[in-house]
Each structure stands twice: as C-alpha cells, then as structure tokens.
Image (spheres, rainbow, N blue to C red):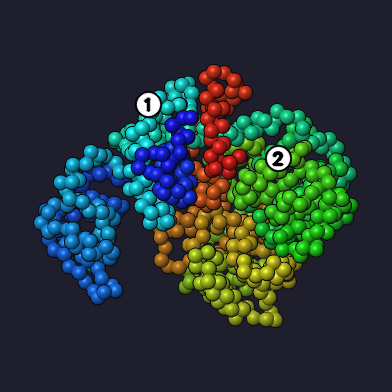
Amino acid sequence: MSYFQKDIEFVKTVGPQRAAVLRKELEIHNVSDLLYHFPFRYVDRSKFYTIAQLNDDLPYVQIKGVITSLTAFGNKRTTRLQAVFKDESGSMDLVWFQGITWIRDSIKAGTSYVVFGKPALFNSKWSIIHPEIEEFEKFTAQPFKGFQPFYYSTEKSKVKGIDSKGIMRIMRMALKDLPPTIEETLSPQLIKTFNLMPRHDALIQIHFPENEDLLRKARFRLKFEELFYIQLKLLLNKQNRTATQNGRMFTEVGYLFNTFFNEHLPFELTQAQKRVLKEIRKDTISGKQMNRLLQGDVGSGKTVIALFAMLLALDNKQQACLMAPTEILAAQHFQTITSLLSSLPVNVELLTGSLPESKKKAVIERISSNETHILIGTHALIEDRVKFNDLGIVIIDEQHRFGVEQRAKLWMRQQPPHVLVMTATPIPRTLAMTLYGDLDVSIIDELPAGRKPIKTMHLFESSRLRVIGFMKEQIKLGRQIYIVFPLIEESEKLDLQNLMAGYDSIQRDFPLPEYFVSMVHGKMKAKDKEQEMERFVNGKTHIMIATTVIEVGVNVPNATVMIIENAERFGLSQLHQLRGRVGRGAEQSFCILMSGNKLSADARERLKTMVQTNDGFEIAGTDLKLRGPGDITGTQQSGLLNLKIAELAKDGAILEHARNAVINILNDDPLLNSEENKIFYRHLHQLREQPNWSKVS
Ligand code: ADP
Ligand code: MG
C-alpha cells in the first residue's frame, strides 16, 4: 500500500476521534484526500503592516504592537472587551465578544504582541474583531515563518478542533512523513515539456510555500494534473464509445422527415441549421453512437433541428425523446411540436413529474408498447421505470442543468440511443471542454433572417411612467409583454412580496376589461402555471408577470417587450437568457432593464454590457471576467464539477495545454500501452476509487 492510501486515523496526532470528524465533515479518508485538501488562501506571515498603512483593500493583516489598556463594556449579556493597541505609527482597537475572561487574564499590558486579523473601520477608527494574538517573542521563536495556509472546514469540524489551524497541524505531520520517492502521476515527458514541478515538491509547496514563486509553480503543476486527468477520462470515454460499432443506423430519410421538410416547415432553414442537420445525418449513419453538443444563441432555432433529428429516428422505426429542464419548457416544447406535426401520423406525449400517477402509468405503458413515438418531458423521462420499446435518439435541451451523470445513464443501455445536447447560453469554452469534452460540437452561428436586433435600455424608477406609456403603445400594436422579477432563494419571502406588489400595481395601471395580465412563479401549482402560460402563449393575455421560471426556452414570437425589474440582481447570462425571450418574430423588440439608483461597479458593468451588445459569446466572455473563479453558471458549486484547484475562469490556457497533451498521447498510443504511459492508467484507477471522482464520469 502506498503512503497515499494510508488511513487518516494513523497519521500522527490524528487518532480515531479526529479521524471520524475528518471523514464525516470533510470527506478526508486517507493521506491522499488530506494532501489534496488544498488551502483556499495564504497569508504571508513574514510581512508586517503598521497601523497607519491600513486601508480598505487589505484582507488580512499582521501588526506588531503593544496593548496599552483593556476595558470591558456593557452588562452581563452584551459584554465586549476592548483593547487599545499601539505601534509607532498610531493606535487601533482590538475587540472580543467571547472568551473575555480568558483574554483579560492572559494579556499583559506593555508586552509586544503580534496580532492578526481582518481590519475594519468603525467610528473612523480601525479595529480587528477577535484577532489572533501571540506574544512577539513566541512568534519569532516559531520555526515556520513563510506563508500560512488557510483551509476550508465546516462549522461542525471547527467545534471539534478541526479548524484551519487544526488541519494545518495535521498537514504538517502528514508531509513530514511523505516519502521522497512518492509515485509520479505525470510522465517524465509531460514534466519535461511543460516544465512541471515534481509531484513530491508540489504537494509540499502547495501547503507550506517557501515563497511566491514556488507556490506559483506548485499550483501550476497541480492544476495541470487535475485538468489532465479530467480530459484523459473524457477522451478515453469518447474513444471507447467510438471504438464500438454499435451505433444505431438512421439510413432511411423517409416519409415523415421529407413530408415535414417539404410541406410543413413554416420557414426556410438558415445555412447554419442546414449544416448542423447534415452533421447529425452523418453521425447517425456512421455506425457509431452520436454524442453531439449543439450550441446556438437564444433564438437561433435549435428546436426545429431537434425535431428533424427525432423524425429521422421515427422514419427508422425507432422512438425519440426530448428532455427539458423545467415543466414549463417541456410543456411548451410539447405544444410547439404537436402543432408542427399536427397533420402527420406521429403520437407525441408529455411526461412530467406533476402528472397524476395514473396518467403517468398510462403514458409509460404507451411508451413501452411503442404506441407513443415522441416523448417530451422533464427528468421524469429517465426514471428507471420508463422503458422505451426502442429508443433511437435522446435530445437534451438546455442541458447544463442536467449534469453529466444523467447523461451517463443513457449510455449504459445495450444499444445506446444517439444523444444530442442543446445549449443556449454560449457557455465559455473552458466550461464546454470540461463538461462536454467528450462530445462533438456543432454551432448555429446565425440567426434566422429578418430578425431585428433587440433594443436594450437601462432605466431607473424615475422613468416608470414613460415605461407604462410605452407598454400601452406596444399592446395597442397587438404585442405582448413580459415583466420579470428576481426570485432568489435567500430572500424568497421578500421577493414574493415584491412580485405580488408588482402584480397589483400592474393591474392598477392596466385594468380590466381592456387589459389582461398573467402571472407565473415557482410557488404555484404546476397545473396553474401551465394554464397561465397557455393563456399568454395563445395571446389571451397582454402581460406576463413572472419570475425567472421563464428564463429558458419559452417561445412566444408575438412578445416584443421584456422588462426586467431589479435587473442589477441578475447575472449576465441570466439577463441574456431572459432577453432572448423577445426578438423571436419579425417585429422590433425591446428589453428594458429597471434598476435601483445605487449600483455596484459590477452591476453597472453588467447592465452596460447588456445595453451595448446582443452577442451571446461576447456576453459570456464579460460574464466570465466579472464573476471570476468558482462561479461559472453555478456549476462549480452545484457539485457538477468538483475541481479541487483548477479554476475554469482563469485556467483556460492550462486546460488547453492539458487537453492537447491528452489528444497527442492518445493519438500515439490509444491504449496507453507504452511503458511511459502506463502511469496514467494506474493513476486513473486510483482516482476512480475516490468518491468525488465518479461525478465526472
Ligand atoms: P432556440 O435556439 O433559442 O431554442 P427556437 O428553436 O425556440 O430557438 O427558435 C426561435 C424562433 O425562431 C421560433 O419561433 C422558431 O419557430 C423560429 N425559427 C427557427 N428557425 C427559423 C428559421 N430558419 N427561419 C425563421 N424562423 C425560425
Ligand atoms: Mg430552445
């Protein structure tokens, strides 16, 4: 057994009790898990600030000085201990709300201390609340004075002594015993080509860096390693899939496809749509399973491509299904597709979670008996009990919410169906390569002809009357309007009140019987939601008031105005998605972003970007820049991707290198047979045994 597999319990100073906490709270089971629990921040403990140097931009500081007085304030309940702390440049306060007795008894006036913490300006005086504090003499006696690592821990683990410092101590123990000859995970060739720090050194330097340069090198090495193995896994998967000739053959372009194309298609396909259709055609007669990602900005016309692909399956006597992320969207796809196919002998059905059990059963019955040809729905579609008679193709719309696992489930069938994943948000290339690195990519880079770019403006409350007047004009022209309110979980109640207040005021400004208003939000019953949506889709109501439930996919070409309330609270890609609900017909469309007067710099930049451009790729770029690491479409947190050190927002270049390296290696040695490449299989195998890793598969 290698050192990495050693049970965490047997690392010096850990023992059974702490081991239990480490396992349960931090998923650290062995030395490998521990060493790959990387710091999220470092503080340079060799650097001192003076009180006069303090400013708002400093996160954590270390200051050397003397305590001149200690005073307790308040009564029993609300006591606070306040110390005046001075250095030669000035004076500041140190404040404690807890552990007061202990602090008071142990602190000595007149002695030199080193304090460490986050400074804040309070009553125009700097203070640090609950600083770390240590006598200067003891501080200087410590052996370690470089960068101090800070580790993620949980509330529960902190209580049990496994806080950042606790982890640091254990880490030091584990690293002290790290054998100098630990196994490499990257080949000598890679290490040489990319000038990578050896694994042994990287693991030491990432936790206790001697200086910034070594820290940078350690980081680079570990990021490379992480991204390399993700790509290796994805591309091996792809290689395995394409090596097997068990693909379904859609050789027949038959009655359904041709009749729909020649007689029912309400418009001419764009060049881009035609190209993508050809790519799909080619895939589905290649003898291999299709795994294709279809990227296209909102409104570029992906649905009809999906429909053609499904008709191909049907012409070849196989079934098709279309998965959407929300019930509203599934219902809408159902409506669009049934009406497009109304004069063709195709049975289309809808299956969503909110369908009554008896109806669900009936639908499932008709699927297995092959009575239903196209099934549309939410994740309910991939429940185990849904058994198709012969499923030829699966279309996944707006997929990044679905996750890679669900996709994998589809591949586990005997003769897996072809898979087409459609995504509208032009996702950044780095994310696409990491989430969908095993898929072939098609892009619709052209909007249907005759579309006028949406006019976007940013307005404040003071323009409300003008906005109402404008809405009335548009309604008079026969158009429809969306008004979207934010509904974000933390403040859900307040948001709901906001939405209701908005609804009331719209009803006052747009009274019956002249005007009709619909409302849709997440707290409504599915049935009511559907009904309200339907009234709007059918043009029975003029205004649709909604939360972001309508964010994706909804298609009402007659709607020309999108008003977004509190637009400053939305992310860029969300704003772009919402705006994409209008501009779907030939009429000029408008997007009005309403915001409060007080805006953060980021919010101002987001709104400005929206006003300036309609280009989804440009918006994705700005989005990535503004949101920075760890926050791409919420994916990193959602557990979809469990990156330990790489940051997709920043590490695009490393990712490209890692991916190209994998491609080259697999080109020369597809089975990783050579002596040099065996190392990869070994390490992949070890990674598979980790709980997190399976999520990537
Ligand atoms: P998305 O790519 O966002 O899913 P949709 O498939 O919903 O876009 O298409 C948006 C609108 O454009 C729909 O009303 C659709 O009927 C229409 N559309 C699609 N392709 C064309 C085309 N080639 N010419 C004209 N209109 C089109
Ligand atoms: Mg769509």
Q: Residue at x 85, y 40 (%)?
A: 316
Residue linked to disc 2? 411
User: Mark 2: which secondary structure?
Assistant: helix
Counting labels gives 2
Q: Position of residue 141 (x, y in %)?
A: 18, 42
Amino acid at pointer 2: Trp
Q: Residues within 10 Å of mark 2 (few under 14, many from 20)?
A: some
The mark that comes first in sequence, 1 or 2, is 1
Give the mark toward the camera: 1 or 2: 1
The amino acid marked with disc number 1 is Pro
Q: For the point 70% across and 30% down, which residue is it?
A: 242
| Badge 1: residue crowd in 10 Å (few <14, some 14–19, many ≥20) | few
Q: Mark 2 near ligand 2 (CB under 8 Å)?
A: no
Q: Is residue 557 visible?
A: no
Q: Is residue 137 above or below residue 354?
A: above
Rendered residue at 74%/45% (across/down): 394
Could you tell me residue 294's position as x and y percent?
66, 43
Give the image quarter of residue 326. bottom right
In the image, residue 643 sits, relative to residue 247, either above or below, namely: below
Is 398 or 677 nearer to us in this picture?
Answer: 677
Whole-angstrom CA distance, mark 1 to mark 2, is 42 Å
Report the disc number at residue 180. Answer: 1
Q: Position of residue 232 (x, y in %)?
A: 57, 31
